[in-house]
Amino acid sequence: MADAMAPPARQMGAIAWLRKHFFNTWYDAIFSIIFAVLIFWGLQALIGWAFVNAIWRVENKNQCTHDAGACWAVIESRGRLILFGLYPYEEQWRSTLACFAVIITIALSCLPRFWSIRRLPLLWVVGFGAFVLLMRGGFAGLPLVTSEKWGGLSLTIFIFSGVFVIGMPLAVVFALARRSSLPVIAKSTGFFIDIVRSLPLLTILFAAAVIVPLLVPEWLQGSKLMRVVVAFAVFFAAYQAEIIRAGLQSTPDGQAEAASALGMPYWSLVVDILLPQAFRNTLPSTINQAVITFKETSIVTIIGFFEVMASGNAAIGTGEWGNQYIEVYVFLALIYFVFVFGLSRYGAWLEKRMRLGHA
Amino acid sequence: MHKPAISIISLEKHYGDFHALKNVNLEVPDGQTLVICGPSGSGKSTLIRCMNGLESYTSGDIDVLGMAVGDNTQVLDQVRKRVGMVFQNFNLFPHLTNLENCVLPQIRSLGRDRGAATEEAQEQLKKMQVNIHAAKFPDQLSGGQQQRVALARALCLKPEIMLFDEPTSALDPEMISEVLDVMQDLARADMTIVCVTHEMGFARAVADRVILMAAGEIVEEGTPVQMFNNPLHDITREFMKVVN
Protein backbone atom coordinates (compact mmCIF):
# COMPACT_ATOMS: atom_id res chain seq x y z
CA MET A 1 0.00 0.00 0.00
CA ALA A 2 2.73 2.45 0.99
CA ASP A 3 4.61 1.64 -2.19
CA ALA A 4 1.57 2.12 -4.33
CA MET A 5 0.96 5.55 -2.82
CA ALA A 6 4.50 6.89 -3.02
CA PRO A 7 4.67 10.10 -5.06
CA PRO A 8 6.15 9.87 -8.53
CA ALA A 9 9.91 10.35 -8.40
CA ARG A 10 11.02 13.79 -9.44
CA GLN A 11 13.87 13.17 -11.75
CA MET A 12 13.95 16.23 -13.89
CA GLY A 13 17.34 17.72 -14.72
CA ALA A 14 17.86 21.47 -14.85
CA ILE A 15 17.88 21.41 -18.64
CA ALA A 16 14.65 19.43 -18.86
CA TRP A 17 13.05 21.74 -16.33
CA LEU A 18 14.08 24.85 -18.29
CA ARG A 19 12.82 23.26 -21.47
CA LYS A 20 9.46 22.43 -19.99
CA HIS A 21 8.80 25.78 -18.37
CA PHE A 22 10.56 28.32 -20.59
CA PHE A 23 11.33 26.86 -24.03
CA ASN A 24 8.35 24.69 -24.71
CA THR A 25 7.46 26.44 -27.99
CA TRP A 26 9.28 28.95 -30.18
CA TYR A 27 7.26 31.89 -28.78
CA ASP A 28 7.86 30.72 -25.24
CA ALA A 29 11.55 30.82 -26.08
CA ILE A 30 11.37 34.37 -27.48
CA PHE A 31 9.49 35.71 -24.45
CA SER A 32 11.81 33.88 -22.08
CA ILE A 33 14.89 35.38 -23.70
CA ILE A 34 13.44 38.90 -23.83
CA PHE A 35 12.46 38.80 -20.17
CA ALA A 36 15.71 37.16 -19.12
CA VAL A 37 17.63 40.01 -20.76
CA LEU A 38 15.36 42.64 -19.19
CA ILE A 39 15.61 41.08 -15.73
CA PHE A 40 19.37 40.73 -16.03
CA TRP A 41 19.75 44.31 -17.19
CA GLY A 42 17.45 45.62 -14.43
CA LEU A 43 19.14 43.63 -11.68
CA GLN A 44 22.58 44.63 -12.88
CA ALA A 45 21.64 48.31 -12.82
CA LEU A 46 20.01 47.97 -9.39
CA ILE A 47 22.87 46.04 -7.82
CA GLY A 48 25.38 48.38 -9.38
CA TRP A 49 23.56 51.39 -8.02
CA ALA A 50 22.65 50.02 -4.61
CA PHE A 51 25.80 48.06 -3.76
CA VAL A 52 28.73 48.04 -6.18
CA ASN A 53 28.97 51.73 -6.88
CA ALA A 54 27.38 52.87 -3.64
CA ILE A 55 29.05 55.13 -1.13
CA TRP A 56 28.43 53.93 2.42
CA ARG A 57 30.20 56.46 4.61
CA VAL A 58 31.33 60.01 4.01
CA GLU A 59 33.20 62.61 6.05
CA ASN A 60 30.86 65.30 4.84
CA LYS A 61 27.91 65.28 2.49
CA ASN A 62 29.78 66.99 -0.36
CA GLN A 63 31.50 63.70 -1.02
CA CYS A 64 28.14 62.35 -2.20
CA THR A 65 28.70 63.47 -5.75
CA HIS A 66 29.15 60.10 -7.31
CA ASP A 67 26.22 59.83 -9.71
CA ALA A 68 26.69 56.18 -10.62
CA GLY A 69 25.78 54.82 -7.20
CA ALA A 70 23.67 55.37 -4.15
CA CYS A 71 24.96 57.43 -1.26
CA TRP A 72 23.68 55.53 1.78
CA ALA A 73 25.39 57.97 4.09
CA VAL A 74 22.15 59.94 4.01
CA ILE A 75 20.44 57.15 5.93
CA GLU A 76 23.15 57.13 8.54
CA SER A 77 22.89 60.87 8.90
CA ARG A 78 19.10 61.24 8.67
CA GLY A 79 17.95 57.79 9.74
CA ARG A 80 17.06 58.90 13.24
CA LEU A 81 14.86 61.64 11.87
CA ILE A 82 13.06 59.12 9.68
CA LEU A 83 12.62 56.63 12.52
CA PHE A 84 11.90 58.97 15.42
CA GLY A 85 10.86 62.35 13.97
CA LEU A 86 11.37 65.18 16.42
CA TYR A 87 11.58 62.88 19.45
CA PRO A 88 14.37 64.16 21.75
CA TYR A 89 17.71 62.65 20.78
CA GLU A 90 18.73 61.38 24.23
CA GLU A 91 15.35 59.70 24.73
CA GLN A 92 15.20 57.88 21.43
CA TRP A 93 16.07 54.56 23.07
CA ARG A 94 12.59 54.75 24.61
CA SER A 95 11.04 55.15 21.21
CA THR A 96 13.02 52.13 19.97
CA LEU A 97 11.90 50.01 22.92
CA ALA A 98 8.30 51.15 22.46
CA CYS A 99 8.36 50.11 18.80
CA PHE A 100 9.73 46.72 19.76
CA ALA A 101 6.98 46.33 22.36
CA VAL A 102 4.32 46.84 19.70
CA ILE A 103 6.09 44.75 17.08
CA ILE A 104 6.37 41.88 19.58
CA THR A 105 2.71 42.33 20.43
CA ILE A 106 1.78 42.14 16.76
CA ALA A 107 3.95 39.06 16.31
CA LEU A 108 2.47 37.33 19.38
CA SER A 109 -1.10 38.07 18.35
CA CYS A 110 -0.32 36.29 15.10
CA LEU A 111 0.13 33.04 17.04
CA PRO A 112 -3.08 31.01 17.23
CA ARG A 113 -2.45 30.21 20.88
CA PHE A 114 -3.24 33.82 21.76
CA TRP A 115 -6.57 33.78 19.94
CA SER A 116 -8.93 33.83 22.83
CA ILE A 117 -11.31 36.45 24.05
CA ARG A 118 -9.23 36.97 27.18
CA ARG A 119 -5.66 36.62 25.96
CA LEU A 120 -5.81 38.80 22.86
CA PRO A 121 -7.23 41.95 24.46
CA LEU A 122 -4.95 41.48 27.47
CA LEU A 123 -1.92 41.15 25.20
CA TRP A 124 -2.82 44.34 23.36
CA VAL A 125 -3.57 46.34 26.49
CA VAL A 126 -0.15 45.36 27.85
CA GLY A 127 1.77 45.87 24.59
CA PHE A 128 0.05 49.07 23.59
CA GLY A 129 0.13 50.37 27.16
CA ALA A 130 3.89 49.74 27.28
CA PHE A 131 4.28 51.69 24.05
CA VAL A 132 2.35 54.72 25.32
CA LEU A 133 4.07 54.73 28.74
CA LEU A 134 7.53 54.48 27.19
CA MET A 135 6.85 57.10 24.55
CA ARG A 136 5.18 59.53 26.90
CA GLY A 137 7.30 59.05 29.97
CA GLY A 138 6.77 61.50 32.81
CA PHE A 139 7.36 58.89 35.53
CA ALA A 140 10.30 57.13 37.21
CA GLY A 141 12.71 59.79 36.06
CA LEU A 142 11.74 59.54 32.42
CA PRO A 143 11.20 63.05 31.04
CA LEU A 144 7.71 63.73 29.67
CA VAL A 145 7.55 63.73 25.87
CA THR A 146 4.12 64.82 24.67
CA SER A 147 2.57 63.39 21.54
CA GLU A 148 3.29 66.50 19.42
CA LYS A 149 6.93 65.47 19.47
CA TRP A 150 6.28 61.90 18.44
CA GLY A 151 7.22 61.18 14.88
CA GLY A 152 8.75 58.97 12.25
CA LEU A 153 8.30 55.22 12.18
CA SER A 154 7.28 55.15 15.84
CA LEU A 155 4.39 57.49 15.10
CA THR A 156 3.33 55.33 12.15
CA ILE A 157 3.37 52.27 14.40
CA PHE A 158 1.47 54.15 17.12
CA ILE A 159 -1.27 55.22 14.72
CA PHE A 160 -1.52 51.78 13.13
CA SER A 161 -1.73 49.89 16.39
CA GLY A 162 -3.96 52.53 18.00
CA VAL A 163 -6.38 52.22 15.09
CA PHE A 164 -6.34 48.46 15.51
CA VAL A 165 -6.75 48.44 19.29
CA ILE A 166 -9.72 50.82 19.19
CA GLY A 167 -11.09 49.89 15.78
CA MET A 168 -11.24 46.10 16.06
CA PRO A 169 -13.50 45.88 19.14
CA LEU A 170 -15.57 48.70 17.68
CA ALA A 171 -15.91 46.75 14.42
CA VAL A 172 -17.16 43.71 16.34
CA VAL A 173 -19.72 45.87 18.15
CA PHE A 174 -20.84 47.48 14.86
CA ALA A 175 -21.15 44.12 13.13
CA LEU A 176 -23.21 42.62 15.97
CA ALA A 177 -25.36 45.74 16.25
CA ARG A 178 -26.05 45.69 12.52
CA ARG A 179 -27.31 42.12 12.85
CA SER A 180 -29.34 42.93 15.95
CA SER A 181 -32.91 41.68 16.03
CA LEU A 182 -34.01 45.13 17.22
CA PRO A 183 -34.70 47.11 14.03
CA VAL A 184 -33.85 50.48 15.58
CA ILE A 185 -30.34 49.37 16.51
CA ALA A 186 -29.75 47.43 13.28
CA LYS A 187 -30.96 50.26 11.02
CA SER A 188 -29.18 53.10 12.80
CA THR A 189 -25.89 51.17 12.94
CA GLY A 190 -26.22 50.35 9.26
CA PHE A 191 -26.91 54.01 8.48
CA PHE A 192 -23.90 55.13 10.52
CA ILE A 193 -21.59 52.60 8.85
CA ASP A 194 -22.77 53.63 5.41
CA ILE A 195 -22.21 57.31 6.17
CA VAL A 196 -18.68 56.73 7.44
CA ARG A 197 -17.86 54.58 4.44
CA SER A 198 -19.16 57.21 2.04
CA LEU A 199 -16.87 59.91 3.45
CA PRO A 200 -13.21 60.21 2.46
CA LEU A 201 -10.76 59.39 5.25
CA LEU A 202 -9.20 62.82 4.83
CA THR A 203 -12.49 64.56 5.59
CA ILE A 204 -13.00 62.50 8.72
CA LEU A 205 -9.47 63.16 9.99
CA PHE A 206 -9.79 66.88 9.27
CA ALA A 207 -13.07 67.00 11.11
CA ALA A 208 -11.49 65.25 14.10
CA ALA A 209 -8.46 67.53 14.14
CA VAL A 210 -10.05 70.87 13.35
CA ILE A 211 -13.82 70.82 13.82
CA VAL A 212 -14.20 68.70 16.94
CA PRO A 213 -12.34 71.24 19.14
CA LEU A 214 -14.91 73.85 18.13
CA LEU A 215 -17.86 71.71 19.15
CA VAL A 216 -16.71 69.64 22.09
CA PRO A 217 -15.86 70.98 25.57
CA GLU A 218 -12.15 71.13 26.25
CA TRP A 219 -12.01 68.40 28.89
CA LEU A 220 -13.39 65.94 26.36
CA GLN A 221 -11.15 66.86 23.45
CA GLY A 222 -8.00 64.96 24.29
CA SER A 223 -4.91 65.70 22.28
CA LYS A 224 -5.05 66.21 18.55
CA LEU A 225 -3.26 62.90 17.98
CA MET A 226 -5.79 61.06 20.14
CA ARG A 227 -8.69 62.56 18.20
CA VAL A 228 -7.10 61.63 14.90
CA VAL A 229 -6.45 58.04 16.02
CA VAL A 230 -10.01 57.66 17.29
CA ALA A 231 -11.46 59.07 14.07
CA PHE A 232 -9.21 56.80 12.02
CA ALA A 233 -10.35 53.87 14.18
CA VAL A 234 -14.01 54.65 13.51
CA PHE A 235 -13.26 54.75 9.80
CA PHE A 236 -11.43 51.43 10.01
CA ALA A 237 -14.23 49.92 12.12
CA ALA A 238 -16.86 50.81 9.54
CA TYR A 239 -15.04 48.78 6.90
CA GLN A 240 -13.95 45.98 9.20
CA ALA A 241 -17.50 45.67 10.57
CA GLU A 242 -18.76 44.84 7.10
CA ILE A 243 -16.04 42.21 6.75
CA ILE A 244 -16.99 40.65 10.09
CA ARG A 245 -20.66 40.82 9.18
CA ALA A 246 -19.92 38.91 5.99
CA GLY A 247 -18.09 36.33 8.10
CA LEU A 248 -21.01 36.02 10.51
CA GLN A 249 -23.42 35.58 7.62
CA SER A 250 -21.27 32.88 6.06
CA THR A 251 -21.42 30.82 9.25
CA PRO A 252 -24.18 28.21 8.80
CA ASP A 253 -27.39 28.62 10.83
CA GLY A 254 -26.80 25.16 12.24
CA GLN A 255 -23.95 26.51 14.37
CA ALA A 256 -26.22 28.88 16.26
CA GLU A 257 -28.92 26.20 16.49
CA ALA A 258 -26.50 23.66 17.92
CA ALA A 259 -25.23 26.13 20.51
CA SER A 260 -28.79 27.10 21.51
CA ALA A 261 -29.88 23.47 21.65
CA LEU A 262 -26.97 22.82 24.02
CA GLY A 263 -28.23 25.60 26.28
CA MET A 264 -25.21 27.83 25.71
CA PRO A 265 -25.95 31.48 26.54
CA TYR A 266 -26.05 34.13 23.80
CA TRP A 267 -22.74 35.74 24.75
CA SER A 268 -21.05 32.36 24.54
CA LEU A 269 -22.62 31.69 21.15
CA VAL A 270 -21.18 34.98 19.89
CA VAL A 271 -17.78 34.82 21.58
CA ASP A 272 -17.00 31.09 21.41
CA ILE A 273 -18.75 29.99 18.24
CA LEU A 274 -19.69 32.75 15.79
CA LEU A 275 -16.88 35.32 16.04
CA PRO A 276 -13.97 32.85 15.86
CA GLN A 277 -15.49 31.33 12.73
CA ALA A 278 -16.31 34.74 11.26
CA PHE A 279 -12.70 35.87 11.71
CA ARG A 280 -11.34 32.66 10.24
CA ASN A 281 -13.65 32.84 7.25
CA THR A 282 -12.72 36.42 6.48
CA LEU A 283 -9.02 36.29 7.22
CA PRO A 284 -7.87 37.34 3.71
CA SER A 285 -10.10 40.43 3.78
CA THR A 286 -9.04 41.30 7.32
CA ILE A 287 -5.34 41.07 6.41
CA ASN A 288 -6.07 43.17 3.34
CA GLN A 289 -7.77 45.78 5.49
CA ALA A 290 -4.77 45.81 7.85
CA VAL A 291 -2.38 46.35 4.92
CA ILE A 292 -4.50 49.19 3.55
CA THR A 293 -4.70 50.78 7.00
CA PHE A 294 -0.94 50.57 7.47
CA LYS A 295 -0.32 52.33 4.19
CA GLU A 296 -3.06 54.90 4.80
CA THR A 297 -1.42 56.08 8.01
CA SER A 298 0.71 58.37 5.83
CA ILE A 299 -2.36 60.54 5.31
CA VAL A 300 -1.98 62.09 8.77
CA THR A 301 0.88 64.15 7.36
CA ILE A 302 -1.69 66.48 6.01
CA ILE A 303 -2.88 67.52 9.44
CA GLY A 304 0.63 68.13 10.64
CA PHE A 305 1.92 64.83 11.98
CA PHE A 306 5.36 63.67 10.97
CA GLU A 307 4.92 59.97 10.50
CA VAL A 308 7.56 57.99 8.66
CA MET A 309 6.73 59.28 5.17
CA ALA A 310 6.64 62.92 6.22
CA SER A 311 9.84 62.48 8.24
CA GLY A 312 11.48 61.07 5.13
CA ASN A 313 10.39 64.12 3.18
CA ALA A 314 11.72 66.35 5.94
CA ALA A 315 15.03 64.50 5.84
CA ILE A 316 15.63 65.54 2.25
CA GLY A 317 13.70 68.80 2.40
CA THR A 318 16.40 70.78 4.15
CA GLY A 319 18.48 71.01 1.00
CA GLU A 320 21.50 69.60 2.71
CA TRP A 321 20.71 66.08 1.54
CA GLY A 322 18.36 67.17 -1.22
CA ASN A 323 20.12 65.17 -3.90
CA GLN A 324 19.75 61.91 -2.05
CA TYR A 325 15.95 61.72 -2.30
CA ILE A 326 16.05 58.42 -4.20
CA GLU A 327 18.01 56.75 -1.42
CA VAL A 328 15.57 58.04 1.18
CA TYR A 329 12.51 56.91 -0.76
CA VAL A 330 14.07 53.48 -1.33
CA PHE A 331 14.66 53.26 2.41
CA LEU A 332 11.05 54.27 3.11
CA ALA A 333 9.79 51.77 0.56
CA LEU A 334 11.82 49.07 2.29
CA ILE A 335 10.25 49.91 5.65
CA TYR A 336 6.73 49.68 4.21
CA PHE A 337 7.66 46.55 2.32
CA VAL A 338 8.91 44.74 5.42
CA PHE A 339 5.63 45.39 7.24
CA VAL A 340 3.23 44.81 4.39
CA PHE A 341 5.03 41.81 2.92
CA GLY A 342 5.29 40.31 6.40
CA LEU A 343 1.56 40.74 6.89
CA SER A 344 0.62 39.16 3.59
CA ARG A 345 3.01 36.22 4.00
CA TYR A 346 1.53 35.66 7.43
CA GLY A 347 -1.95 35.72 5.89
CA ALA A 348 -0.94 33.15 3.31
CA TRP A 349 0.58 30.91 5.99
CA LEU A 350 -2.59 31.13 8.10
CA GLU A 351 -4.85 30.26 5.20
CA LYS A 352 -2.76 27.24 4.36
CA ARG A 353 -2.69 26.15 7.98
CA MET A 354 -6.45 26.45 8.27
CA ARG A 355 -7.03 24.49 5.09
CA LEU A 356 -5.20 21.66 6.83
CA GLY A 357 -7.93 21.67 9.45
CA HIS A 358 -6.14 23.30 12.36
CA ALA A 359 -7.67 25.99 14.49
CA MET B 1 -50.08 9.33 37.81
CA HIS B 2 -46.69 9.72 36.18
CA LYS B 3 -46.35 12.96 34.30
CA PRO B 4 -45.40 12.59 30.63
CA ALA B 5 -41.95 13.83 29.61
CA ILE B 6 -43.40 15.78 26.70
CA SER B 7 -46.99 16.82 26.22
CA ILE B 8 -48.23 18.83 23.27
CA ILE B 9 -51.78 20.15 23.04
CA SER B 10 -53.44 21.49 19.86
CA LEU B 11 -50.23 22.85 18.37
CA GLU B 12 -50.60 25.09 15.30
CA LYS B 13 -47.85 26.61 13.20
CA HIS B 14 -48.10 28.91 10.18
CA TYR B 15 -45.23 30.04 7.98
CA GLY B 16 -46.94 32.97 6.28
CA ASP B 17 -49.66 31.28 4.21
CA PHE B 18 -48.26 27.80 4.74
CA HIS B 19 -49.97 25.77 7.45
CA ALA B 20 -47.03 23.72 8.74
CA LEU B 21 -48.60 22.06 11.80
CA LYS B 22 -52.32 21.40 12.16
CA ASN B 23 -53.78 20.65 15.56
CA VAL B 24 -50.99 18.35 16.75
CA ASN B 25 -51.67 16.53 20.04
CA LEU B 26 -48.99 14.29 21.42
CA GLU B 27 -47.79 12.80 24.67
CA VAL B 28 -44.46 11.10 25.19
CA PRO B 29 -44.27 9.18 28.47
CA ASP B 30 -41.04 9.02 30.42
CA GLY B 31 -38.61 6.46 28.99
CA GLN B 32 -40.49 5.95 25.75
CA THR B 33 -38.87 5.84 22.32
CA LEU B 34 -41.04 7.57 19.77
CA VAL B 35 -40.30 7.53 16.06
CA ILE B 36 -41.85 10.19 13.85
CA CYS B 37 -41.92 9.40 10.15
CA GLY B 38 -43.65 10.71 7.09
CA PRO B 39 -43.01 12.12 3.63
CA SER B 40 -40.79 15.20 3.32
CA GLY B 41 -42.58 18.46 4.01
CA SER B 42 -44.99 16.78 6.39
CA GLY B 43 -43.90 18.91 9.36
CA LYS B 44 -42.02 16.26 11.35
CA SER B 45 -38.82 18.31 11.64
CA THR B 46 -40.82 21.40 12.51
CA LEU B 47 -42.59 19.48 15.25
CA ILE B 48 -39.41 18.12 16.85
CA ARG B 49 -37.74 21.55 16.65
CA CYS B 50 -40.71 23.06 18.49
CA MET B 51 -40.03 20.72 21.40
CA ASN B 52 -36.84 22.58 22.44
CA GLY B 53 -37.88 25.98 21.17
CA LEU B 54 -35.65 26.14 18.09
CA GLU B 55 -38.85 26.80 16.18
CA SER B 56 -41.63 29.08 17.37
CA TYR B 57 -45.29 28.14 16.99
CA THR B 58 -48.48 30.03 16.38
CA SER B 59 -50.74 28.58 19.08
CA GLY B 60 -51.12 25.61 21.38
CA ASP B 61 -49.16 24.37 24.38
CA ILE B 62 -45.92 22.49 24.68
CA ASP B 63 -44.90 21.18 28.06
CA VAL B 64 -41.49 19.54 28.42
CA LEU B 65 -40.41 18.10 31.79
CA GLY B 66 -43.02 20.28 33.44
CA MET B 67 -41.82 23.49 31.78
CA ALA B 68 -43.82 25.51 29.27
CA VAL B 69 -41.80 25.84 26.06
CA GLY B 70 -42.62 29.27 24.65
CA ASP B 71 -41.09 32.70 24.28
CA ASN B 72 -39.54 32.87 27.74
CA THR B 73 -35.83 32.54 27.04
CA GLN B 74 -34.98 31.71 30.65
CA VAL B 75 -37.33 28.74 30.61
CA LEU B 76 -35.97 27.77 27.17
CA ASP B 77 -32.43 27.73 28.57
CA GLN B 78 -33.59 25.41 31.35
CA VAL B 79 -35.36 23.14 28.88
CA ARG B 80 -32.33 22.97 26.57
CA LYS B 81 -30.01 22.02 29.40
CA ARG B 82 -32.17 18.97 30.05
CA VAL B 83 -33.09 18.10 26.45
CA GLY B 84 -30.33 17.07 24.05
CA MET B 85 -30.59 17.32 20.30
CA VAL B 86 -28.76 15.74 17.38
CA PHE B 87 -29.06 17.24 13.91
CA GLN B 88 -29.03 15.91 10.39
CA ASN B 89 -25.84 17.86 9.56
CA PHE B 90 -24.12 17.16 12.90
CA ASN B 91 -23.48 20.89 13.45
CA LEU B 92 -20.22 20.30 15.26
CA PHE B 93 -18.16 23.44 15.83
CA PRO B 94 -15.50 23.18 13.11
CA HIS B 95 -12.94 25.44 14.80
CA LEU B 96 -12.81 23.32 17.97
CA THR B 97 -11.37 19.85 18.45
CA ASN B 98 -13.82 17.04 18.99
CA LEU B 99 -12.94 17.01 22.67
CA GLU B 100 -13.43 20.76 23.00
CA ASN B 101 -16.76 20.41 21.17
CA CYS B 102 -17.87 18.26 24.11
CA VAL B 103 -16.13 20.26 26.86
CA LEU B 104 -17.16 23.83 26.04
CA PRO B 105 -20.97 23.37 26.21
CA GLN B 106 -20.64 21.78 29.67
CA ILE B 107 -18.65 24.76 30.91
CA ARG B 108 -20.96 27.35 29.34
CA SER B 109 -24.34 25.72 30.04
CA LEU B 110 -23.83 23.95 33.32
CA GLY B 111 -20.92 25.93 34.73
CA ARG B 112 -18.82 22.81 35.19
CA ASP B 113 -15.12 23.35 35.72
CA ARG B 114 -12.80 22.34 32.92
CA GLY B 115 -11.38 19.30 34.68
CA ALA B 116 -14.74 17.68 35.36
CA ALA B 117 -15.98 18.62 31.90
CA THR B 118 -12.96 17.05 30.23
CA GLU B 119 -13.41 13.87 32.22
CA GLU B 120 -17.07 13.63 31.28
CA ALA B 121 -16.31 14.41 27.62
CA GLN B 122 -13.69 11.69 27.43
CA GLU B 123 -16.06 9.19 28.95
CA GLN B 124 -18.85 10.00 26.51
CA LEU B 125 -16.48 9.97 23.53
CA LYS B 126 -15.32 6.57 24.66
CA LYS B 127 -18.88 5.26 24.91
CA MET B 128 -19.42 6.46 21.34
CA GLN B 129 -16.12 4.81 20.36
CA VAL B 130 -14.62 8.00 18.98
CA ASN B 131 -12.26 8.75 21.88
CA ILE B 132 -9.21 8.10 19.68
CA HIS B 133 -10.31 11.09 17.58
CA ALA B 134 -10.63 13.47 20.55
CA ALA B 135 -7.71 15.67 19.53
CA LYS B 136 -8.74 15.90 15.88
CA PHE B 137 -11.01 18.46 14.30
CA PRO B 138 -14.51 17.49 13.12
CA ASP B 139 -13.75 17.74 9.41
CA GLN B 140 -11.02 15.12 9.79
CA LEU B 141 -13.69 12.54 10.67
CA SER B 142 -16.18 10.59 8.59
CA GLY B 143 -19.85 11.50 8.74
CA GLY B 144 -20.67 8.59 11.01
CA GLN B 145 -17.87 9.50 13.40
CA GLN B 146 -18.93 13.15 13.42
CA GLN B 147 -22.49 12.21 14.27
CA ARG B 148 -21.24 10.08 17.17
CA VAL B 149 -19.17 13.01 18.44
CA ALA B 150 -22.32 15.15 18.18
CA LEU B 151 -24.17 12.54 20.19
CA ALA B 152 -21.41 12.46 22.81
CA ARG B 153 -21.53 16.26 22.98
CA ALA B 154 -25.25 16.18 23.70
CA LEU B 155 -24.95 13.34 26.24
CA CYS B 156 -22.25 15.19 28.20
CA LEU B 157 -25.00 17.44 29.55
CA LYS B 158 -26.77 14.35 30.94
CA PRO B 159 -30.06 15.11 29.20
CA GLU B 160 -33.31 13.47 30.28
CA ILE B 161 -34.71 13.57 26.75
CA MET B 162 -32.92 13.18 23.41
CA LEU B 163 -34.30 14.63 20.20
CA PHE B 164 -32.97 13.25 16.91
CA ASP B 165 -33.75 15.19 13.75
CA GLU B 166 -33.01 12.81 10.86
CA PRO B 167 -29.69 11.76 12.39
CA THR B 168 -28.70 9.42 9.57
CA SER B 169 -30.06 11.23 6.50
CA ALA B 170 -26.75 12.93 5.66
CA LEU B 171 -24.69 9.77 6.09
CA ASP B 172 -23.28 7.40 3.52
CA PRO B 173 -25.16 4.08 3.66
CA GLU B 174 -22.27 2.15 5.20
CA MET B 175 -22.11 4.56 8.15
CA ILE B 176 -25.78 4.54 9.07
CA SER B 177 -25.60 1.45 11.24
CA GLU B 178 -22.74 2.70 13.43
CA VAL B 179 -24.95 5.65 14.44
CA LEU B 180 -28.14 3.61 14.77
CA ASP B 181 -26.33 1.12 16.99
CA VAL B 182 -25.45 3.70 19.62
CA MET B 183 -28.95 5.16 19.40
CA GLN B 184 -30.42 1.74 20.05
CA ASP B 185 -28.23 1.38 23.13
CA LEU B 186 -29.67 4.65 24.42
CA ALA B 187 -33.22 3.54 23.73
CA ARG B 188 -32.67 0.27 25.57
CA ALA B 189 -31.21 2.22 28.50
CA ASP B 190 -34.65 3.85 28.93
CA MET B 191 -33.73 7.33 27.74
CA THR B 192 -36.77 9.26 26.54
CA ILE B 193 -36.23 9.59 22.80
CA VAL B 194 -38.04 11.37 20.01
CA CYS B 195 -36.56 10.55 16.63
CA VAL B 196 -37.47 11.79 13.19
CA THR B 197 -36.18 9.17 10.78
CA HIS B 198 -36.83 7.07 7.69
CA GLU B 199 -34.91 4.16 9.20
CA MET B 200 -37.72 1.71 9.75
CA GLY B 201 -35.24 -0.91 10.92
CA PHE B 202 -34.52 1.32 13.91
CA ALA B 203 -38.23 1.81 14.52
CA ARG B 204 -38.87 -1.91 14.37
CA ALA B 205 -35.99 -2.68 16.73
CA VAL B 206 -36.48 -0.18 19.55
CA ALA B 207 -39.47 2.13 19.03
CA ASP B 208 -42.31 1.87 21.54
CA ARG B 209 -44.51 3.91 19.27
CA VAL B 210 -44.46 5.19 15.70
CA ILE B 211 -46.22 8.31 14.44
CA LEU B 212 -46.87 9.04 10.81
CA MET B 213 -47.27 12.66 9.78
CA ALA B 214 -48.50 14.05 6.49
CA ALA B 215 -49.26 17.66 5.53
CA GLY B 216 -48.73 18.90 9.09
CA GLU B 217 -51.04 16.42 10.76
CA ILE B 218 -50.59 13.24 12.70
CA VAL B 219 -52.26 10.72 10.42
CA GLU B 220 -51.77 7.54 12.36
CA GLU B 221 -49.97 6.26 15.39
CA GLY B 222 -49.39 2.87 16.89
CA THR B 223 -46.82 0.26 17.81
CA PRO B 224 -44.24 -0.55 15.12
CA VAL B 225 -45.83 -3.96 14.48
CA GLN B 226 -49.25 -2.47 14.00
CA MET B 227 -47.93 0.35 11.77
CA PHE B 228 -45.94 -1.97 9.56
CA ASN B 229 -48.33 -4.87 9.36
CA ASN B 230 -51.83 -3.39 9.64
CA PRO B 231 -51.76 0.26 8.70
CA LEU B 232 -55.22 1.80 8.83
CA HIS B 233 -54.69 4.67 6.40
CA ASP B 234 -53.79 4.66 2.71
CA ILE B 235 -51.08 7.28 3.31
CA THR B 236 -49.42 5.04 5.89
CA ARG B 237 -49.64 2.05 3.59
CA GLU B 238 -48.11 4.01 0.71
CA PHE B 239 -45.35 5.39 2.91
CA MET B 240 -44.42 2.04 4.41
CA LYS B 241 -44.22 0.57 0.92
CA VAL B 242 -41.78 3.26 -0.17
CA VAL B 243 -39.45 3.17 2.84
CA ASN B 244 -39.30 -0.57 3.30
Image: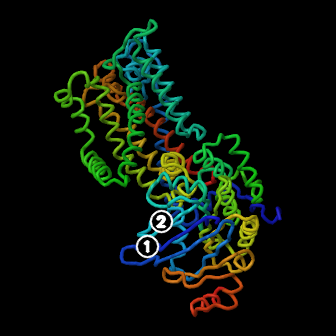
Instruction: Classify mark 2: helix, strand or loop.
Output: loop
Give the residue displayed 78% in from the left and 61% down from the top: A6
* Residue A86 image-quadrant placement: top left
Q: Going by the image, does A155 lie left or right of A115?
A: left
Q: Is residue A197 above or below residue A117?
A: below
Q: Nearer the viewer, residue B102 or A229?
A: B102
Q: Position of residue A115 (x, y in %)?
A: 55, 40
Q: Report if residue A283 is visible in the image.
A: no
| Quadrant housing residue A110 | top right
Tell how many labels.
2
| Any part of residue B130 in sight | yes
Name the subunit of mark 1. B
Q: Secondary structure at mark 1?
A: strand
Q: Is residue A217 left or right of residue A352?
A: left
* Disc 2 target residue: B55
Query: Residue A311, position in %: x, y?
Result: 34, 24
Kindly identify which numbered label has been placed on residue A305: none
Q: Amino acid at mark 1?
A: Lys
Q: Pointer 1: residues within 10 angstroms few (<14), some, or many (20+)? A: many
Q: Which mark is residue B13?
A: 1
Residues at marks 2 and 1, common chain? Answer: yes
Q: Nearer the viewer, mark 2 or mark 1?
A: 1
Q: Quadrant of the N terminus of chain A?
A: bottom right
Whether pointer 2 and pointer 1 mark residues with C-beta atoms closer than 8 Å, the reply is: yes
Q: Nearer the viewer, residue B194 or A48?
A: B194
- The relative height of residue B36 versus residue B147 in the rendered view (above or below) is below
Of all chains, the one bearing label 2 is: B
